[in-house]
Image: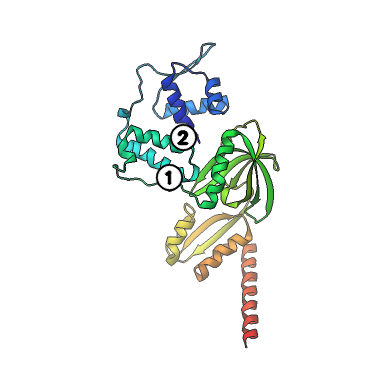
Amino acid sequence: MRLDRMLGITLELMTKRRVTATELAARFEVSIRTVYRDIELINQAGIPVASFAGTDGGFELMDGFFLTKQHFSVDDFAVIYNLLKSMEGAVGGKLTTLKNKLGSLHPALANGGCDDKLIFDMSASEGERAIIHPLYNAIHQSKRVAFSYTGASGTVSERRVEPIRLYWERGVWYLEGYCLLRHGIRFFRITRMTKFHVSEEVFQPREASTETPPETTDGMQVHLRFDLNAQPRVFEQFPGECVHQGTHIDVHTTCYSTEYALSIVLSYGSKAVIVSPDELKRAFIDELKEMQKRYVQNDGEEK
């Protein structure tokens, strides 16, 4: 995790006069390029790190800077502490150690003496934890993993992956890794993995991408129109994709399978209308005809 690593680098700089990029890369098992990026982010966070070139070069905290708990209020620590606590159930391991270290700086955090003004929910289900815990260890140990994966279209494939990092976005956990089947960096949604196991094959870590998950294939551009009485659910399901038109709500979104798009429209009943594309309209009409046929057939059998 980047937060864990950046705090680790900061602590390393606090305990040593000067440390090289090579030493930090070896210590945290990342590339030298990643170290330079982390140092830049640490600088942007307000911790002044000086860089020195040459054979004697490296990084060190600027003279006169000391990181003590006086630089942070209890509320500042509470935000970081609650963030780590919310992730602990899903990841555990080093995050638990880091959370305990923060708790030792301000015992009020660990003893519940500080009000939770900001609550994070980055937890995971039991099934997700069964994958995330060993996956987190596999990332640190640079071990390949294997699993069956169900794509957005419903296709199941067997994957062997060199895991790079875990990614959490909008309540969903993803794995970023180099897929040996597709020969490239891919994002995998944890809930779509089955038959997961960690192999004993060790790999040379690759550079993480700068992209964000989740989908890597082109999807269907869909325009849906909803009644106003469906507004609360629509705004929750399609954040940033809703346009309130006064008499209705328009949504422009991307669906990665016809089946998924149909399931959305059907779940809203008469409160939703497909504006485009035409092929989705036809698929919806065919689905309605098939449903009607089944009801008529069942009604006839009962009589």
Labels 1 and 2 touching (C-beta < 8 A):
no
Percent position of residue 79, x then y: 36, 40
Q: Is residue 202 above or below residue 232?
A: above
Give the quarter of the image for residue 211: top right
Q: Residue at x 61, y 67 (%)?
A: 284
Q: For this view, does 16 lie left or right of residue 133?
A: left
Residue 148 location, x and y as percent?
66, 50
Q: Residue 274 in the image: x percent, y percent? A: 56, 64
Picture quadrant of residue 22: top right
Instruction: Name the residue located 49 percent from the left edge and 34 percent from the top edge.
Output: 2
| Residue nearest the viewer, comparing 294 with 126 | 126
- Residue denoted by label 2: 3
Q: Is residue 155 above or below residue 177?
A: below
Q: Is residue 149 visible?
A: yes
Give residue 71's mark.
none
* 303 vs 22: above or below: below
- Residue 151 location (% of width, % of height): 64, 52
Q: Quadrant of the C terminus?
A: bottom right
Secondary element at image label 2: helix
Q: Select label 1 or label 2 by which is in front.
A: 1
Amino acid of disc 2: Leu
Tag 1 residue: 86
The residues bearing labels 1 and 2 have C-alpha atoms spaced at a distance of 14 Å
- Of labels 1 and 2, earlier in sequence is 2
Label 1 element class: helix
Residue kind at label 1, given as amino acid type:
Ser
Left or right of residue 73, residue 152 in this image: right
* Residue 253 sits in quarter: bottom right
Neighbor class of circle 2 (other Cα within 10 Å; few <14, some 14-19, many 20+) is few
User: Which residue appears farthest toward the top when viewing the image?
Assistant: 55
